[in-house]
Amino acid sequence: MTSRRPYLIRALYDWVLDNDLTPHLLVAADAEGVNVPREFVTEDGKITVNISPGAVRGLSLDNELVSFSARFSGQSFNVSLPPGAVLALYARENGEGMLFGEVETPPTPPEGGPGDKSDGDGDDDEGAKKKHPHLKVVK
């Protein structure tokens, strides 16, 4: 199954904006694939970023990548990070939102790719034969 975190991030983002509040992301800056301005990362390896429409440009909350351009101390920076690095999304004004907890790493695909049913020796197992659907046309 795919991660639910990107879906929750999008839903919470919309919810915070619908309530006229300011969405902030708490990000594990040391997680793999995170590109943020290092000078704004705290000693515990986290960065908080305002992702309201007035604070960022080109916000993309995709399943594989959160990306946007923002200004940090007047300097433009292209931020990108995997959704698994988002630790929380909350409203600045009241702290309402969701804490996701630990960094979520994407699962590694099994050897041979998805759906590979062979045992790696080139011969298919007897039990791994294709199954046909048991649907009938009803008239």
Image: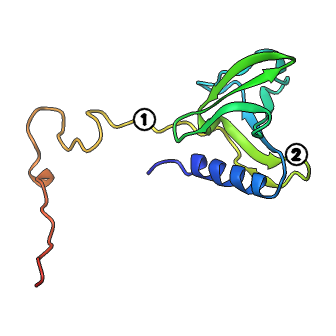
In the rendered image of this protein, does residue 16 appear above or below residue 120? Answer: below
Residue displayed at 75% across by 17% down: 76
In the image, taking residue 14 as reference, residue 90 lies left or right, namely right
Q: Which residue is mark 1?
A: 108
Q: Residues within 10 Å of mark 1 (few under 14, many from 20)?
A: few
In the rendered image of this protein, does residue 24 appear above or below residue 76? Answer: below
| Pointer 2 or 1: first along the chain | 2
Residue contact at pointers 2 and 1, CB within 8 angstroms = no
Residue displayed at 77% across by 40% down: 52
User: For the residue labelled by badge 1, is the local secondary structure a helix, a strand or a loop?
Assistant: loop
Q: Nearer the viewer, mark 2 or mark 1?
A: 2
User: For the residue labelled by badge 2, is the local secondary structure a helix, a strand or a loop?
Assistant: loop
Task: Using the image, tell me which numbered label, if any, was put on residue 74.
Answer: none
In the image, taking residue 47 as reference, residue 111 lies left or right, namely left
Give x and y (percent) for residue 79.
Answer: 67, 24
Q: How is the image coloured?
A: rainbow
Q: Nearer the viewer, residue 81 or 59?
A: 59
- Give the CA distance from mark 2 to mark 1: 35 Å
User: Three-letter amino acid code at disc 1?
Assistant: Thr
- Quarter containing the C terminus: bottom left
Q: Which residue is mark 2?
A: 92
Q: How many marks?
A: 2
Give x and y (percent) for residue 102.
Answer: 68, 41
Residue displayed at 42% across by 35% down: 108
Give x and y (percent) for residue 28.
Answer: 72, 31
In the rendered image of this protein, does residue 75 appear above or below residue 81? Answer: above
